[in-house]
Amino acid sequence: MQAGSPKWRRRAEARPGEIVQAAFDVFAEKGFAAAKLDDIAARAGISKGALYLYFETKEDLFRAVVREAVVPNLDMEQVLAQTTVPFPDLMRIVLARMGQMIGKTRLGAVAKLVIGESRNFPELARVWHDEVVSRALGALSTALAKAQVRGEIRLGDPRLQAFSIMGPILMGVIWQETFTPVGAPALDLELLISAHGDTVLAGLAPRAGVLK
């Protein structure tokens, strides 16, 4: 009996994480409205009643997916805070991580879910904005402002510069998740992000030794 207890405790403690991962997968495959708690429970290998011990609603599950399965993997705030790294090198590190994250997970599908279903489920957009978009833009804007002070990039509105950096990446995600499944040419997001990084850095670079 005692020999089995630690295993049982580990299983119970692991359940919230397993449920969150199952919810991530089901949301990515079916969208928010079509996803059922029964589907998520079955994917996690538990009963629907057991799921309710940890999460009361799909909205609660979505918040957990964003906070536990998305934000920690992006890790942009911590990376962008490294002021000792020259901005061009820092930007390439961040963009490479984003490309890997999008390519290896269903992050793009969840982003599409938020865009497509936020009118009917505004809480999804609110959570995604507060936990992902706002934090990423804030961290990137701060890094851009510091790079301007150090003379590494041209002067400008850091927030607008951040939007310019992130916009084409979002377009690539939308293309991959919306158009490729219906026959449009497939897009290599990691290659797109790498090429976009070169374009961005060339555009932000100081010209003739003067920031303009």
Image (cartoon, rainbow, N blue to C red):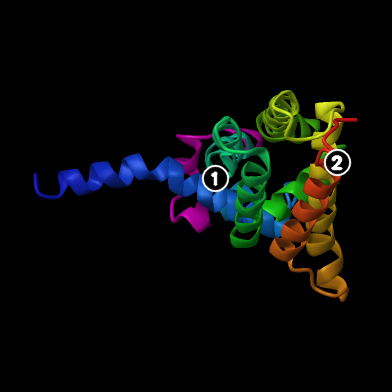
Residue 182 drawn above or below residue 148: below
Amino acid carrying mark 2 in the image: Ser
Q: Nearer the viewer, residue 174 or 99?
A: 99
Which quadrant would the C terminus be assigned to in this image?
top right
Please check the rendered image and state whether residue 44 is part of the magenta-colored stretch, yes or no: yes
> Few, some or many C-alpha atoms within 10 Å of disc 2 (few <14, some 14-19, many ≥20)?
few
Secondary structure of residue under mark 1: helix
Please state the horizontal and vertical placement of residue 156, each as a whole percent of the image. 87, 28
Query: Label for residue 164?
Result: 2
User: Which of the 4 quarters of the picture holds residue 175?
Assistant: bottom right
One can see residue 121 in this view: no
Secondary structure of residue under mark 2: helix
Which residue corresponds to mark 1? Answer: 73
> Which segment is the magenta one?
41-60
Residue found 32% across the figure and 42% down from its top: 12
Q: Main secondary structure of the magenta part?
A: helix
